[in-house]
RNA sequence: CGGGGAGUGGCGCAGCCUGGUAGCGCACCUGUUUUGGGUACAGGGGGUCGGAGGUUCGAAUCCUCUCUCCCCGACCA
């Protein structure tokens, strides 16, 4: 069995505008890189050496977020929040384009309201923040305590998700079949008291979007569930350049209260899976709990079929682990707050003025150009400081294109251009600057940004495809595979008979021993023939198993 | 929540065992130098050592409690 390290051919597209043969080092080729060159990377930890620590370092080195002092909660810094805002803006448009209106519902949910759907309660009860008082008083020792006199008659829970309270509103808003479908969405924060937290991937408080819809019947609701799953796929692949596999979650992984749960799953560079978005068909469960009924064309009261779906700031974690490298983050141009940064090499001398003017001209011309369907987002970084130091700050942040301009560049009418996705000239271990004329650079940038966007996606997709293993058809072979493939075994596609209930529990237990989970049943499942890897019965579908975040 | 590790200027660390009111590298500030690339030299600012309590003449160093972070596990987006 081949090891992960040998399995990923660094597949590159040819650069359209360059003589630059540099390619960035990957997890799999780092050892090779080191033997042929002495590249001095911008981070102190390499992905191949300690992926978890590398992840932490990218977050601080790229200035994405920091600890807050509150357990499990983070401060999202401007660059990190800027990335989230880009995702938010693009996804919001997609959500509006599919007919939804944004609303806002309270962060506090009355306990009795939350209690209505049994499975929902069971799923979330153990990770709820609860508000019990509405006033503090002095404790007599210089501190403050909740005033016993100010106890709430009914506790409020901080929303971990809003199905129940939105269900309440839907019950009021829906009267007749003419009110359906009811398509709503909200952007909000939610709180889940997690045992173990990781920046962006699992925080106690996180930001997300939650869509909630009500429909006349099962067919309409299911169709909508799938429509939103497709919106998420497009957002992940087109905007984040993060390839995903869309499919249905197995019964044991369903959202509490859902009839069907669908997900998009992305493969991180360590081969683990990340659930990047979910879409649920809720049947009539929440309609029953909240009384969401409508009068049909015959005048009969009917229960609505509802859906809900969400993606969160976890997406940012996915971007880090999909596109980051040993020099920091690489932000796909579509979601980069700034796509191009111009760094004048200021020397604190009178000549600086002319240099800034030269750069400003370039900035203005780039800013009026369009790439990836929008105006190019370009920053002229006039902050005082050494250009080289500022360059490495931007490298770590992952801005797609860095343009440095020194006095001699200006004299020659050129600029020094650096692509973040291909930083190094591996032949000499130096940064792979190119020096096109300012005019050429200005004209080439839109196409370059589009190429970088495509290239990041291709790279991630090729890596994922190379790390999905097929043809394993016994549990022993699966065990052997995961025991012999080191730290980065990737995913395995197997066939199964889709056991349910206790039989499924047994399967889940067996997988747990290998630290594996069933990710999803891919939509394009392909032909199935042969036996279930777990039960030996005739297989009915293919599933992905993997270690997961 | 269980097991392990850790919290010392912005970041990374030493000091703690063998108590005597804090040190290094990077970053930062000032000056000089240098200038096509993560420059060099000199000078300088910044921390009371996560928090609370205790032992002691005296605690970053010893004891107790507590908060937060990291890794593994159970749980979960």
Image (tube, grey):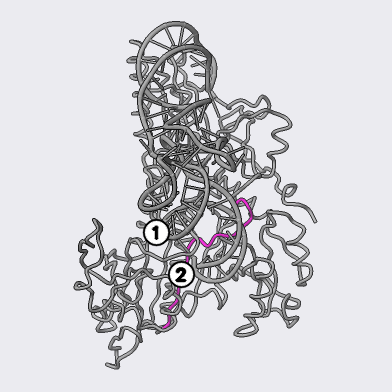
Residue A371 colored magenta? no
Quadrant containing the C terminus of chain A is bottom right
> In front: B8, or A249?
B8
Q: Chain of mark 2?
A: A
Residue A279 image label: 2
Crowdedness of circle 2 by 10 Å Cα count: few (<14), some, many (20+)? many
The location of residue A258, given as percent across then percent down, is 46, 78
Residue A310 visible in the current orientation = yes
Helix, strand or loop at mark 1: strand
Q: Quadrant of residue A351?
A: top left
Q: Main secondary structure of the magenta part?
A: strand
The location of residue A284, given as percent across then percent down, is 40, 84
The location of residue A246, given as percent across then percent down, is 54, 65
**Pointer 1 and pointer 2: residues touching (CB < 8 Å)?**
no
Give left or right: position of A354 versus B70.
left
Name the residue located 58 percent from the left edge and 27 percent from the top edge.
Answer: A432
Residue A277 image label: none
Name the residue located 23 percent from the left edge and 75 percent from the top edge.
Answer: A152
Residue A273 colored magenta? yes
Residues rendered magenta in the picture: A269-283
């Amino acid at each position: 069995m081949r090891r992960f390290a040998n399995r990923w051919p660094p597949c590159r597209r040819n650069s359209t505008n360059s003589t630059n043969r540099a390619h960035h080092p990957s997890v799999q080729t780092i050892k090779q890189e080191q033997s042929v060159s002495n590249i001095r990377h911008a981070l102190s930890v390499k992905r191949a050496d300690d992926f978890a620590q590398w992840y932490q370092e990218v977050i601080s080195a790229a200035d994405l977020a920091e600890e807050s002092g509150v357990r499990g909660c983070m401060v999202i810094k401007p660059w990190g929040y800027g990335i989230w805002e880009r995702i938010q803006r693009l996804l919001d448009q997609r959500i509006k384009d599919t007919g939804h209106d944004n609303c806002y519902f309270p962060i506090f949910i009355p306990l009795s309201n939350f209690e209505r759907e049994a499975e929902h309660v069971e799923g979330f009860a153990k990770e709820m923040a609860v508000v019990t008082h509405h006033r503090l008083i002095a404790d007599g020792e210089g501190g403050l305590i909740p005033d016993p006199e100010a106890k709430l008659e009914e506790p409020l829970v901080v929303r971990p998700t809003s199905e129940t309270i939105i269900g309440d509103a839907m019950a009021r808003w829906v009267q007749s079949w003419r009110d359906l479908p009811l398509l709503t969405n909200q952007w909000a924060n939610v709180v889940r008291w997690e045992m173990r937290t990781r920046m962006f991937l699992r925080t106690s408080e996180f930001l997300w979007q939650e869509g909630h819809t009500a429909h006349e019947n099962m067919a309409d609701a299911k169709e909508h569930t799938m429509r939103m799953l497709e919106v998420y796929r497009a957002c992940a692949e087109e905007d984040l350049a993060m390839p995903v596999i869309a499919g249905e979650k197995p019964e044991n992984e369903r959202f509490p209260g859902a009839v069907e749960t669908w997900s998009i799953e992305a493969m991180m560079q360590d081969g683990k899976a990340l659930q990047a978005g979910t879409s649920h068909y809720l049947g009539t469960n929440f309609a029953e709990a909240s009384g969401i009924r409508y009068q049909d064309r015959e005048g009969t009261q009917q229960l609505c079929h509802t859906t809900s779906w969400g993606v969160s700031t976890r997406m940012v974690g996915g971007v880090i682990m999909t596109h980051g490298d040993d020099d920091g983050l690489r932000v796909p141009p579509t979601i980069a707050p700034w796509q191009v940064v111009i760094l004048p090499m200021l020397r604190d001398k009178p000549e600086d003025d002319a240099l800034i003017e030269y750069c400003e001209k370039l900035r203005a011309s780039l800013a009026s150009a369009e790439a990836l369907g929008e105006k190019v987002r370009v920053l002229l970084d006039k902050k005082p400081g050494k250009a080289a130091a500022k360059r490495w700050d931007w490298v770590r942040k992952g801005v797609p294109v860095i343009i440095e301009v020194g006095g001699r560049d200006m004299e020659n009418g050129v600029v020094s251009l650096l692509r973040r996705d291909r930083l190094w000239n591996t032949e000499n271990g130096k940064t792979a600057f190119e020096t096109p004329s300012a005019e050429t650079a200005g004209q080439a940038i839109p196409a370059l940004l589009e190429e970088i966007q495509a290239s990041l996606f291709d790279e991630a997709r090729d890596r994922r495809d190379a790390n999905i293993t097929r043809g394993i058809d016994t549990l022993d072979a699966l065990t052997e595979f995961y025991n012999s493939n080191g730290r980065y075994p990737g995913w395995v596609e197997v066939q199964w008979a889709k056991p349910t209930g206790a039989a499924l529990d047994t399967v889940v237990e067996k997988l747990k021993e290998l630290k594996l989970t069933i990710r999803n049943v891919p939509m394009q499942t392909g032909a199935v023939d042969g036996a279930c890897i777990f039960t030996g019965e005739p297989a009915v579908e293919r599933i992905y198993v993997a270690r997961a975040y």
